[in-house]
Image (tube, rainbow, N blue to C red):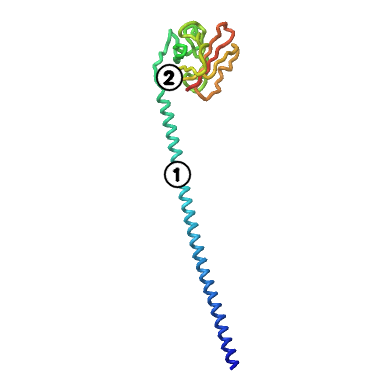
């Protein structure tokens, strides 16, 4: 009887152990499946995230490219607009037998004078002349020289100008360009630094003598 009971106990113990082993096996299988599903889920999620990021970058790139192209087009249009919007004024081609290159107006001192194309002593007795540098209303330093004569078309009143005063140059190629005076000073006659062309803007330099002719009055202006 005792042997039978022992055998029955052993049988149930074996059954219990097998049941536990089987449950553990099932749980591990479930975990593996869930792990695989989890890995697949996150892998798919990561793949979608990468696709979304790439798409966003492509859209941003296209958007920025469109903005840059639009800005370039706008800048070009503005530049063309600026060039086209210079007021026009017909400037005579000759004054008292001398070729004219442009016309100068300085409202502050009520000066309106023609700028003769070629510098010479005889031309200076007629009007102010181009002395050096760029052509009127072009990039560079357009240098104009004139006598300090008490005549309406000469530079006698340059000494009355101040910083911020405006002057206007008219020519038949560009039109009327407005300039603002940014520097006024005097130099010795041998000082030619005022003729320098080291500039990337439209600049005008007016030159005349002081009343005693010992120095030169210099007026510098640049395009507004």
Instruction: Give the labeled residue for mark 2.
Output: 176
Q: Considering only vertical position in the picture, is 139 above or below 47?
A: above
Measure the C-alpha gap from mark 2 to mark 1.
Answer: 42 Å
| Frontmost residue, 132 versus 21 | 21
Among the two numbered marks 2 and 1 on one chain, the one whose residue lies closer to the N terminus: 1
Q: Quadrant of residue 100?
A: top left
> Of residues 110 and 190, which is closer to you in this image?
110
Left or right for 219, reference 66: right
Q: Secondary structure at mark 1?
A: helix
Outermost residue to the bottom: 1
Secondary structure type for disc 2: strand
Disc 1 crowd rating (10 Å Cα; few below 14, some 14-19, many 20+) is few
Q: Quadrant of the N terminus?
A: bottom right
Residue at image location 58% in from the left, 89% down from the top: 7
Q: Position of residue 223 (x, y in %)?
A: 48, 22
Q: Position of residue 48 (x, y in %)?
A: 47, 56
The 10 Å Cα crowd at callout 2, few under 14, some 14 to 19, many 20 or more, is many
Q: Position of residue 141 (x, y in %)?
A: 52, 20
Disc 1 target residue? 62
The quarter holding residue 84 reads: top left
Report the front residue among 37 and 16: 16
| Residue 30, placed above or below residue 72 | below
Residue 204: give x, y in percent of width and height. Answer: 50, 18
Q: Which mark is residue 47?
A: none
* Residue at 47% across, 44% down: 61
Q: Is residue 122 above or below residue 65?
A: above
């Amino acid at each position: 009887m005792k042997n039978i009971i022992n055998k029955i106990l052993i049988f149930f113990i074996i059954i219990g152990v097998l049941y536990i082993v089987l449950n553990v096996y099932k749980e591990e299988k479930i975990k593996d499946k869930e792990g695989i599903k989890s890995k697949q889920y996150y892998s798919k999620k990561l793949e979608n995230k990468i696709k979304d990021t790439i798409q966003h970058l492509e859209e941003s790139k296209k958007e920025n490219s469109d903005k840059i192209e639009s800005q370039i087009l706008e800048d070009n249009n503005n530049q063309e607009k600026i060039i086209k919007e210079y007021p026009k004024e017909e400037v005579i081609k000759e004054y008292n037998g001398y070729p004219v290159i442009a016309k100068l107006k300085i409202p502050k001192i009520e000066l309106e004078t023609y700028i003769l194309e070629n510098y010479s002593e005889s031309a200076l007795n007629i009007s102010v002349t181009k002395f050096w540098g760029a052509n009127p209303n072009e990039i560079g330093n357009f240098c104009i020289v004139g006598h300090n004569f008490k005549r309406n078309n000469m530079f006698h009143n340059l000494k009355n100008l101040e910083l911020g005063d405006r002057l206007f140059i008219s020519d038949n190629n560009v039109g009327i360009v407005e300039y603002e005076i940014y520097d006024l000073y005097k130099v010795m006659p041998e000082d030619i630094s005022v003729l320098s062309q080291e500039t990337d803007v439209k600049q005008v330099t007016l030159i005349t003598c002081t009343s005693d002719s010992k120095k030169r009055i210099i007026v510098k202006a640049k395009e507004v």
